[in-house]
Amino acid sequence: MADFATPEHLAAYWRPLATAEQGRATTLLGYAAMFIRQEAPDIDERIAADPNLAEAARWVSVDMVADAMAIAPSHRGKLAFAEAKGPFNQSATFDAGQFGRLRLTDQHRKALGLNTGDQPTWKFGGESCLRW
């Protein structure tokens, strides 16, 4: 199955990508598509019925990957870092839920037409149903 976005889409959304980043971006966009399809197994059929949803899936993909790539791989898993060089200091505190990884947020789920909270569900005749 095709990814929802390309490195070119990511560059237009976020910033130009260095040549060395192209491969990582391609890989992460593939994983983002996989995560989206895990959360919304019917996304491809829904996109066929509503082409605007393709744009939402593209945005979700590039937003997930931009967040993941914004944190250098050397800082993965850290909550904060600080470094000093002469009179210059740099420090950052990261969102505890990100750690430089792909993450599907409630805003992403909403854009894809998915539930954002716990709701009772059940299966009836092979179909997933929401109670309310």
Image (cartoon, grey):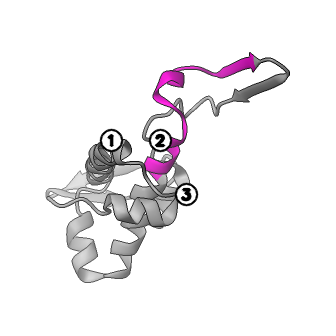
Q: Which residues are magenta?
A: 64-84
| SS at circle 3 | helix
Q: Is residue 123 above or below residue 72?
A: below
Look at 57% across and 32% down and name the residue there.
97
Horizontal relation, residue 118 to residue 40: left or right: right
Taking 59 as reference, is 23 left or right?
left
Q: Label 1 to label 3, Cα distance in Å?
A: 24 Å
Residue at 25%, 82% in the rendered image: 49
| Circle 1 SS class | helix
Viewport quadrant of the N terminus = bottom left
Q: Indicate the position of residue 60 as horizontal and vertical percent values.
A: 44, 59
Give whichever of 52, 31 is nearer the camera.
Answer: 31
Q: x and y percent of residue 58 in the render?
A: 38, 65
Q: Residue furthest front?
A: 86
Q: In the picture provided, is 44 more to the left or to the right than 108?
A: left
Residue 24, which numbered label?
1
Residue plotted at (39% across, 65% down): 9
Instruction: Kindly identify the residue that appears in the image at 38 percent across and 80 percent down.
Output: 52
Residue bearing the label numbered 3: 107
